[in-house]
Image (spheres, helix red, strand yellow):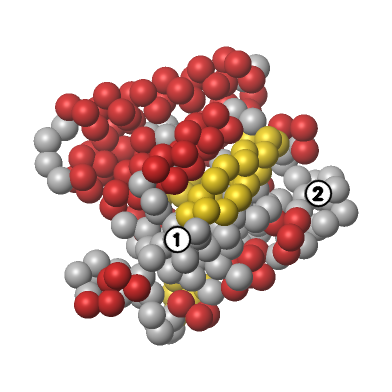
Amino acid sequence: MLQERGVITAANPLPCDRLQRVRFLHWDMKGQKAEGQMLVLDVVAPQVDALFAALYQAKFPLNSALPLEQFAGDDVLSMNANNSSAFNGRAITGAKSWSKHAYGVAMDINPLQNPYISFADDGGLNVLPAASAKSYLNRNELRPEKSRRAGLVTEPVVSLFAQHGFMTWGGDWDAPIDYQHFEIGSRRYMNELIQLPLEQARANFNQYVERYRACSANEQGSLGEVRVRCVAKVRQ
């Protein structure tokens, strides 16, 4: 099915049998309950399930959370539909090497409110999705229209992702800047998890999560300051 719908090919670095669907309830942009799903690496699936339960409890809205089969594996179509997603057997945007989405260890959240921004050599901007450019490049939460900006990834949301092992946030990058993007850590750590037996890999990932939580419980400072310090100490 994934291959037929253009989401994976035989060349993908992770086989289909290592993927697991996580189904969950979420709030939509109108404050209504909706069903969503994320297709992720089997190792991280329990933490992803807990993460979306926490986002639901916090009433953080997702416009939609549909698998990439609904978009024939086309990431741009998914972004243009403001769809949150995880697995997609594709290369890094603007590059040739495999994206961490192709391993099921990265997620994109509300792309319209949280765009991907790259920079040309002449200083020009490329914003994806393009519809984000006029409304969502200014991340200042204190703007008067804040109440109309549901789905904006802010520090409490970023910290929730870190609390469940997704410690790398593209909003911390300089170039490109990828406000929608979360991933678990380095390629070395990702490959280590993939190569371990499933239960051992899940135990390893849970220990990774617990080290971050223990650090964040003991650090002093703002939510963002604590996250940055603990990620630097713990992330693999």
Q: At label 2, which amino acid type do we have?
A: Leu
Residue at image coords 59%, 28%: 43
Say if residue 158 shows up in the picture.
no
Specify the amino acid type for callout 1.
Gly
- Which of the two residues, 96 or 206, is positioned nearer the viewer here? 206
In whole angstroms, how far apart are the C-alphas of marks 1 and 2? 31 Å
Residue pictured at 30% horizontal, 28% vertical: 213
User: Which residue is labeled 2 in the image?
Assistant: 2
Foreground pick, 98 / 152: 152
Quickly name the residue at label 1: 31
Q: Which of 97/230 is in front?
A: 230
User: How packed is label 1: few (under 14 Cα within 10 Å), some, or many (20 or more)?
Assistant: few
Dot 2: element:
loop
* SS class, disc 1: loop
Question: At x 60% / y 70%, what residue is drawn?
Answer: 81
Q: Taking 100 as reference, is 125 above or below it?
A: below
Q: Left or right: where does residue 87 sit relative to residue 202? A: right
Indicate the quadrant where residue 147 lies: bottom left
Could you tell me residue 14's position as x and y percent? 72, 38
Q: Quadrant of residue 91?
A: bottom right
Residue 57 position within the rendered picture, expressed as x and y whole percent measured from the top left: 39, 43
Q: Where is residue 1 in the image (x, y as percent from the top left)?
A: 85, 48
Q: In which quarter of the image is residue 137?
A: bottom left
